Every structure is written in C-alpha cells, then in structure tokens.
Image (cartoon, helix red, strand yellow):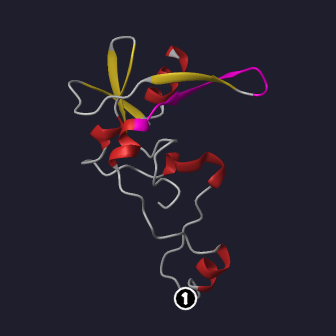
C-alpha cells in the first residue's frame, strides 16, 4: 500500500490533506496474476451521489460530430480515468486514509459511481 501511495503522490494523482469532510478506507485486492491492487472503498460516497442518467454516445456518433473541430483530443483510454482532473470543489470527497495520513485524489479515481458517464 505504501509503495502504491508513494507512486500516486509522485505522479501527482493524489495529495496529502488534513481534516477532510469525507473519508474512505483502502482495501487491498488480489489480482488474477497474484499481484495486489489498492482500491478505495467509495461505497458511502456512491450512495450519496445521484446516478447520472445521461449515457455516453456511441464512438461512431462522437467521431461523426467532429467533422470540422477546432480542437480534437484523443485521450489514451489505456490509462483510464486518471487523465480527467477532478473539480477542486469535489476533490475533498475522494479522501481516503492510510497509515494515519489522509490523501485525496486530484484526478478521477477508479470506483466512483458516475466515472463511466464522465
């Protein structure tokens, strides 16, 4: 867990915080290839959030809508939601605790209810 947290801090995905309003626990999950993955349990936060009822457009509709774009971004989906920055007001809701220290995500973490819709 410590190694994963240090890695996330070093690349700027998470930041140390004091006295967060929301706090979630960390759970270690074994992957199929026998390695471990750190997951934050956002069960309580997901219960407090309304479900986003707007589904994503299909990929062909997205490309058809960009016939003459001024800007075009191709997000690398391999890296998942970590490329989407959290709104500063919502960062406090992604707080979690490990080793008596609290951290929060600066980017979209895995496990949030509406991350797929985003």
Query: Residue at 53% across / 56% down in the picture?
Result: 116
Question: Magenta segment: does it hold 42?
Answer: yes
> Does residue 100 lie above or below 112 as drawn?
above
Residue 20 image point, x, y percent: 23, 30
Question: Most extreme residue toward the top, as rendered?
Answer: 99
Query: Residue at 36% across / 56% down in the picture?
Result: 50
Residue 13 image point, x, y percent: 44, 37
Question: Most extreme residue toward the right, as rendered?
Answer: 33
Q: Name the residue nearer the viewer: 75 or 92.
A: 92
> Does residue 90 lie above or below 10 as drawn?
below
Q: Name the residue nearer the viewer: 67 or 2.
A: 2
Query: Residue at 47% across / 23% down in the picture?
Result: 26
Residue bearing mark 1? 68
For label 1, the SS is loop
> Does residue 16 lie above or below 100 as drawn?
below
Query: Residue at 38% across / 44% down in the picture?
Result: 47
Q: Name the residue nearer the viewer: 117 or 61.
A: 117
Question: Magenta segment: does it hold 34?
Answer: yes
Residue 33 image point, x, y percent: 79, 25
* Quadrant in the rendering for residue 97: top left
> Does residue 7 lie above or below 87 as drawn?
above
Question: Most extreme residue toward the front, as rendered?
Answer: 47
Region of the chain picked out in magenta, as a range: 32-43
* Quadrant in the rendering for residue 38: top right
């Amino acid at each position: 867990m410590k190694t994963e947290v240090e890695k996330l801090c070093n690349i700027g995905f998470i930041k140390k915080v004091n006295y967060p309003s929301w706090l979630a626990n960390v759970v270690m999950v074994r992957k199929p290839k026998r390695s471990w993955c750190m997951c934050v349990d956002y069960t309580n936060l997901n219960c407090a959030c309304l479900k986003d009822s707007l589904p994503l457009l299909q990929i062909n509709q997205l490309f058809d809508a960009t016939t003459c774009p001024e800007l075009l971004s191709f997000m690398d989906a391999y890296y998942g939601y970590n490329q989407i920055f959290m709104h500063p007001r919502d960062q406090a809701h992604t707080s979690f605790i490990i080793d008596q220290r609290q951290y929060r995500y600066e980017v979209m973490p895995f496990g949030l209810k509406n991350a797929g819709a985003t």
